[in-house]
Image: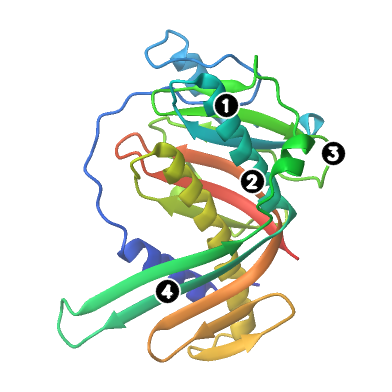
Amino acid sequence: MRKANHGARFARLVLSFLPVCAALVFAVPSYGFGKKEQGVQAGSSQSAAVQERQSEPGFGMGDGLVFIGVSNRRSNRDEAIQIALEDAARRLSFFDSVWARSVSRDYRGGRALDVSIGSEYVLEYERDLGRYIEELEFDPETDVFENNNAVFVVARKAGGSPMPSARGHSFGNRRPAWVDSPPLEIGGYPAGVGFAVRHADHRDTIIKSYERATVNIIESMAVQISGGQEHFQGTNSVFDFTMSAAGEITASGTLTNFYIIESWTDPANLSVWTLAVARDR
């Protein structure tokens, strides 16, 4: 079982240093890729119908595993599709294996405003994406979706480990329940939620969000080896975890079957939340 007190501490550390983004009025359609549909542009009369599909179960195992890649909009649409396909291949690489190390620092002095909080992480995964692209099935006529900020591709990999159904990426005003109440597991897989504030390129925001979901799962799984101790240094066969008296928390480990269940762009500020699952190696 996870140590809820340490998991909560990680959550507080992350939330405490998130900057407040200025509200931005932004109306775009939602893509809950439950079926193969042509992309719907903002303002289209079909937007409402697309948004309704957010609540559908999503992709079943009959479609194989689903990896949604993203690119910024470009003048050359073919280039944008290729970049998005490479991101889908990167997510498949994460599915094979991804190692992460995160360091969070929480310093609090004697004065009310004497607080310094920071977090950083490093990821290692197979960066030669050519073979992963070859493993993905993708139809440029039916598997490309666009909005004002990005181009998405929906790529599939036949077979693979049975995973919970993916529900795609949405832009709707309806805030998913898992944003405020993150699940500890889904379908027997440890779950995690990643968050990223708005970047200049929406693609970068989405990528940072799913990277942070990776880190969140590793942090949550790594604290299991601490035995509930406040200051601890230890390791098992997969994870390392350290909590120092100076307020520095370090966690590292390797995941396989990292799989994105759903991601959501908050239309108020273009931040992105990602829900994912994985298993230890």
Mark 2 / mark 4, whichever is N-terminal: 2
The residue indicated by pointer 1 is: 81
Q: Residue at x 67, y 41 (%)?
A: 89
Give the foreground label among 1 and 3.
1
Q: In the structure shown, which secondary structural element does the residue marked by tag 2 occupy?
A: helix
The colour style of the image is rainbow
The answer for how far apart the CA atoms under marks 1 and 3 are is: 24 Å
Disc 3: CA contacts within 10 A as few (<14), some (14-19) or many (>=20): few
Q: Position of residue 202 (x, y in %)?
A: 41, 38
Residue contact at pointers 1 and 3, CB within 8 angstroms = no
Give the amino acid at mark 4. Ser
The answer for how far apart the CA atoms under marks 2 and 3 are is: 16 Å
Q: Is residue 28 above or below residue 276?
A: above
Give the amino acid at mark 1. Ile
The residue indicated by pointer 3 is: 159
Q: Which mark is residue 104?
A: 4
Q: Is residue 146 above or below residue 173?
A: above
The residue indicated by pointer 2 is: 91
Side (left or right) of 4 relative to 109: right
Residue contact at pointers 1 and 2, CB within 8 angstroms = no
